[in-house]
Image (cartoon, helix red, strand yellow):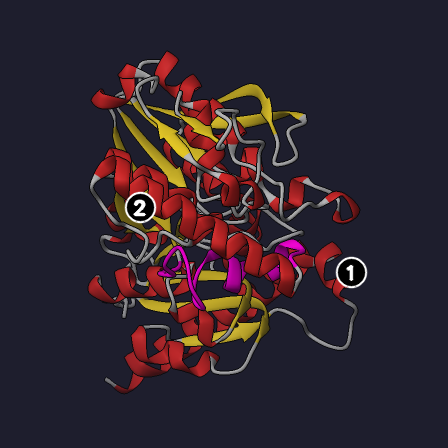
Amino acid sequence: MAAPETRVRVVVAPDSFKESLSAARVAQAIAEGVREAAPSAHILCVPMADGGEGSLDAVLAATSGERRTATVQNANGEPCEASWGWLGDRTAFIEMAEAAGLERIPTHARRALHAGTFGVGQLVLRALDAGARRIVLGLGGSATTDGGAGLFQALGARLLDDRGQPLPPGGAALNRLARLEVDGLDPRLTGVRFEIAVDVDNPLCGPQGAAAIFGPQKGASPEDVAVLDTGLARFADLCRQQSGRDESATPGTGAAGGLGFVIKTFFDAEFRPGVEVIAELSALDQALEGAHLVFTGEGRMDRQTLLGKTPAGVARHARRHGADVIALAGSLGEGYEALYEIGITAAFSVVCGPMTLAQACEDASRLLTDRARDSMLLWQAALARTDSTA
């Protein structure tokens, strides 16, 4: 708690509100509410993410990195403009959803069996062209379930069927994989350190794997899931034969349709919780030094938020610095109370009455400002009462 004469220091470190506001805009809206309640407060905004969609924007906002763009293939093999980040110190940040994201493909055009990650590999090549020696790859929000096969092909590997013909894109084609050739991999890859930012710990295959758990949300039917899972198992087997390593059961290899699997197998990538990677790149701990209060949040908070999502990560960091934490969400779902056990002081929904999802998304900025103001007023009243009775 701040002493009466101390200027209150507030850190605003939220995730994006999907389909509504970026993390930077969420932070701005919350900061406006804090300022209405406490005009003299020192406010520092640190937009956050957990490695999935919005991570690139959050990292660039926090680091003043350079946004670069390239024309690559989307998950359906069609040309698209994708952004990536150059952070200096020969570090590149790539958000895989920029090239192979589910939200980039209209619902009617999604092809769960044939979506591929070739475009993500093209972004890696752009980073190599720029001289990157460290590539941070954020996983999440993918339209794909190909185990990273498309990325591997873009980097120079050859995936061949029993007639020696290159496989077409997508996880279903992996069932026809007969030979894997890696002699043509870009030689610059040997001088790069990969870090994979993930927020799930699923393995590549099986009942908890990429196809079974995430395939349905990408449009895969139960029959499609079975096809994709056997294809991934086939790919994993040939990768093991070629590399001498079996990473298919490694936690996190099932993220983003298995994209990290092939990078872990052949380039010994380091898997890290996405929120920890973003916290490091965004210098969150430095921002939290001396903070009295922290605001965080995301579109929906529930029991799943504990599993590597941004509010949970921010709360853990804030607790180490002794700061109170207020979490704001579009909605609070079942089990959100468990967040109190890891350092969140209080959690509130920003929705103030009955409204449609469309209305909530449209008014999200105002709702966040109002709730941040109200929360700040309540926190200050509690602080004043504590000081008066001390």
Q: Residues within 10 Å of mark 1 (few under 14, many from 20)?
A: few
Q: Residues within 10 Å of mark 2 (few under 14, many from 20)?
A: many
Give the mark, 2 or 1, whose residue is nearer the N terminus.
Answer: 2
Residue 322: where, in percent of width, then height?
23, 67
> Is residue 369 in view?
no
Residue 167: where, in percent of width, then height?
53, 31
Q: Nearer the viewer, mark 2 or mark 1?
A: 2
Q: Which residue is mark 2?
A: 277
Secondary element type, mark 2: helix
Q: Nearer the viewer, residue 209 or 370?
A: 209
201 falls in the magenta region:
yes
Q: Nearer the viewer, residue 158 or 59?
A: 158
Residue depicted at x 43% and y 67%: 208
Image: 303 above or below 245: below
Secondary element type, mark 1: helix
Q: Nearer the viewer, residue 246 or 141?
A: 246
The quarter of the picture where the C terminus appears is bottom left
Asked if residue 226 lies left or right of residue 306, the reply is right
34 falls in the magenta region:
no
Q: Label 2 to label 1, Cα distance in Å?
A: 32 Å
The quarter of the picture where the N terminus appears is bottom left
Q: Quadrant of residue 369?
A: bottom right
> Is residue 348 in view?
yes
Residue 315: where, in percent of width, then height?
33, 65
Q: Amino acid at mark 2?
A: Val
Magenta extent: 200-220
Q: Amino acid at mark 1?
A: Ala
Asked if residue 53 lies left or right of residue 381, the reply is right
Q: Residue 358 bears which disc, if any?
A: 1
Residue 66: where, in percent of width, then height?
44, 22
Q: Quadrant of residue 351?
A: bottom right
